[in-house]
Image (cartoon, grey):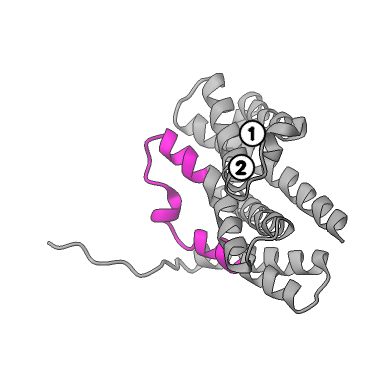
Amino acid sequence: MKDRSLTLLTVLDLAGTLLFAIEGATTAIGGNLDLLGLMVLGFATALAGGIIRDLLIGAVPPSSLRDWRYSALALLGAVLAFFLHRSVQAIPNDILTVLDAAGLAMFAIAGAEKALVYKMHPLVAVLLGTVTGVGGGTVRDILLAHVPIILRADVYATAALAGSAVMIVARRLGVRPAVAAFLGGAVCFLLRMISVWLHWNLPRVAAAP
């Protein structure tokens, strides 16, 4: 069972890595960064969340640094965004939002799954799933001197929290790991997309005039 879980989280991690690398590099293009800047932003967006997760659970060196496939996919995504920038920039925002939501779901579930493999408490696993999903984007925004998206836009980290929680509850109820991962990922993805379509936001305190 542990081997199946490790295989599942590896597949989710790798798929999310490529998606987030392309997204990070695309953001770098909008920030007028050069090729090195694209590669740095793509690498950070794709891998920072997983690195933070692994450091917190004591999985060192982090898997994304031990396994060459992670770095290769992150850099490949950045290079693809650089050489195909006209095509990338022509992609409609709606499609980019879908890809971002898919990457968020993959990373959140992979992060929560790995936390469970390392015997973390379910609540901690939910938090680590969220960190995995939003960590890379947060580092990307900080490098670009932007307020991180998780602090200002729609329902983002909340979607990762919800998806991770659903996956872990399903596992506790005896659902097979692959099915539980699908359920959690679907909840994360759908909640993120619905929040964008319906312009949902968490409550805010009105600024004093």
Q: Is residue 151 magenta?
A: yes
User: Does residue 71 appear in this view?
Assistant: yes
Residue 89, by quadrant, is top right
Closer to the camera in the image, 103 or 169: 169
Give the dominant element type of the magenta stretch: helix, strand or loop: helix
Where is 179 relative to 90, above or below?
Answer: below
Which residue type does callout 1 highlight? Ser
Which residue type does callout 2 highlight? Ile
Counting from the top left corner in percent of width and height, residue 175 is at 80, 74
Residues at discs 2 and 1 in contact (Cβ within 8 Å): yes
User: Does residue 25 appear in this view?
Assistant: no
Q: Is residue 56 magenta?
A: no
36 to the left or right of 76 = left
64 to the left or right of 56 = right
Residue on which the image places disc 1: 87
What residue is rendered at 35% in x and 70% in y?
203
Closer to the camera in the image, 29 or 162: 162
Residue 77 is labelled as: none
Where is 162 relative to 99, above or below?
Answer: below
Residue on which the image places disc 2: 91
> Magenta segment range?
137-163
